[in-house]
């Protein structure tokens, strides 16, 4: 989903050794994208800020738990962010979850370069999503855009859990290849 810089793994190793400068550098590189994920899922800027703080606190204490075999540093951080958002959503009564208003994202809209890059990324993602078959696209959308767990996706679509997991995994594999091709 995000372009990983070559030195993020090295930064993560340094963070595991307590290097605050490496922590700051990784924060500067990845926090805007992680914040965007949190805002999209939580629909509330202050809640997203709190989750982002939790994510980086977790990173500081668990940098040594990163497993290179399971994905990139950004994927790992995105997963932590997504899981913390889901935890927060589950703890929050539905009636108190606000809708996102235009003013909540004003600062992100004020950066023209970021806006153009976001549009390019969005266009590529749209093309790649169109390349998925119906079940994969539906499962991936429910899991990552709506924040559902695999079990919730399976229940929502009334399909076996294994099928939902397979469709999500295959869809993500396709998207990873498609998004990385550019």
Image (spheres, rainbow, N blue to C red):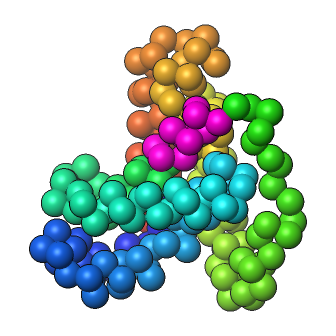
Q: Residue at x 67, y 73 (%)?
A: 118
Q: Position of residue 9 (x, y in %)?
A: 23, 72
Q: Is residue 75 visible?
A: no
Task: Answer with the quarter of the image where residue 106 lies.
Answer: bottom right
Q: Is residue 62 visible?
A: yes
Q: Nearer the viewer, residue 38 or 150?
A: 38
Q: Main secondary structure of the magenta part?
A: helix
Q: Position of residue 151 (x, y in %)?
A: 49, 21
Q: Residue at x 29, y 55 (%)?
A: 71
**Residue 130 lies in the magenta-colored region:** no
Say left or right for 135 vs 166: right
Q: Nearer the viewer, residue 42 or 127?
A: 42
Q: Which residues fall within the magenta stretch? A: 83-92
Q: Relative to 29, say whether 73 is above or below.
A: above
Task: Answer with the quarter of the image where residue 30 lies.
Answer: bottom left
Task: Answer with the quarter of the image where residue 157 lies.
Answer: top right
Q: Relative to 79, say whether 124 is above or below.
A: below
Q: Relative to 65, say whether 97 is above or below.
A: above
Say left or right for 71 vs 144: left
- Residue farthest along the left direction in this orientation: 17
Q: Position of residue 81 (x, y in %)?
A: 47, 53
């Amino acid at each position: 989903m995000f372009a990983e810089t070559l030195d993020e793994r090295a930064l993560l190793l340094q963070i595991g050794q307590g290097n605050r400068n490496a922590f700051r550098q990784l924060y500067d590189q990845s926090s805007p994208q992680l914040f965007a994920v949190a805002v999209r899922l939580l629909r509330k800027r202050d809640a997203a800020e709190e989750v982002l703080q939790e994510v980086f606190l977790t990173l500081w204490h668990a940098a040594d738990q990163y497993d290179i075999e399971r994905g990139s540093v950004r994927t790992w951080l995105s997963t932590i962010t997504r899981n913390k958002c889901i935890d927060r959503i589950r703890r929050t009564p539905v009636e108190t979850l606000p809708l996102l208003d235009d003013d909540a994202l004003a600062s992100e809209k004020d950066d023209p370069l970021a806006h153009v890059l976001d549009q390019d990324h969005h266009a590529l993602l749209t093309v790649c999503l169109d390349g998925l078959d119906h079940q994969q696209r539906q499962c991936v959308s429910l899991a990552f855009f709506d924040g559902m767990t695999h079990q919730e996706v399976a229940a929502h679509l009334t399909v076996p859990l294994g099928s939902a997991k397979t469709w999500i995994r295959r869809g993500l594999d396709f998207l990873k290849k498609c998004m990385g091709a550019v």
